[in-house]
Amino acid sequence: STMVEPHRLSGIFIARGKEDALVTKNLVPGDTVYGEKKIEVELEGAKTEYRAWNPFRSKLAAAVLGGVEAIHIKPGSKVLYLGAASGTTVSHVSDIVGPEGLVYAVEFSHRSGRDLINVAKKRTNIIPIIEDARHPHKYRMLVGMVDTIFADVAQPDQTRIVALNAHHFLKNAGHFVISIKASCIDSTA
């Protein structure tokens, strides 16, 4: 049987088995989002379900496994997620922030947005916003103040986009986490 223990980052867990896996506690037990593996743990008659968080499908999971010091996303956090894509990573952020938290998920592509909306149907703490993150005034009525902005927009003006959104929505003591594509850096050297 698998043992699940808390990761040092709040709201994230490690499943110890033949291979250790990063997991999040499933906000919607029984449901998977992208075919990920489910792990059920029974403790004193109570069952808890976790979802495997694949680092090859999620830069945030890769960062956590890589030992990043903080992601500024924890149970109860309100997060503005820019570049939500199909909602793969967003679903795990939804698990982490839990029922007390919120994820405002912004995605401009209508194709990805359809998937994102479907993910949000079951996960009531995700608010899908199909808009361009360059124009936060267009969704200012939908988004409250947030603790953290997570950005994965892969645009050359990503920093400007984050600053613009922070100006509208980030709390004074808030944080932002930016995912940077390292394709232009030779990381094999």
Image (cartoon, rainbow, N blue to C red):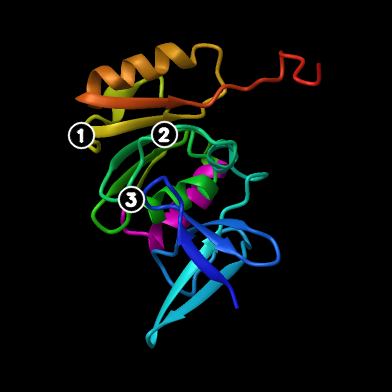
Residue 143 left/right relative to 178: left
The earlier-in-sequence mark between 1 and 2 is: 2
Looking at the image, is mark 1 or mark 2 nearer the viewer? 2
Circle 3: residue type: Val
Disc ID at residue 70: 2
* Residue at point 26%, 34% (across, down): 147
- Residue 122 at x, y percent in the picture: 40, 64
- Residue at the disc numbered 1: 141
Left or right? Give the position of 144 relative to 113: left
Residue under label 3, please give it. Answer: 97
x and y percentages locating residue 27 in the rendered image: 39, 64
* Magenta part of the chain: 111-125
Give SS at disc 2: loop
Going by the numbered disc 2, the residue's amino acid type is Ala
Q: Is residue 133 above or below residue 37?
A: above
Of the 4 image quadrants, the one containing the C terminus is top right
Does label 1 or label 3 sit earlier along the sequence? Answer: 3
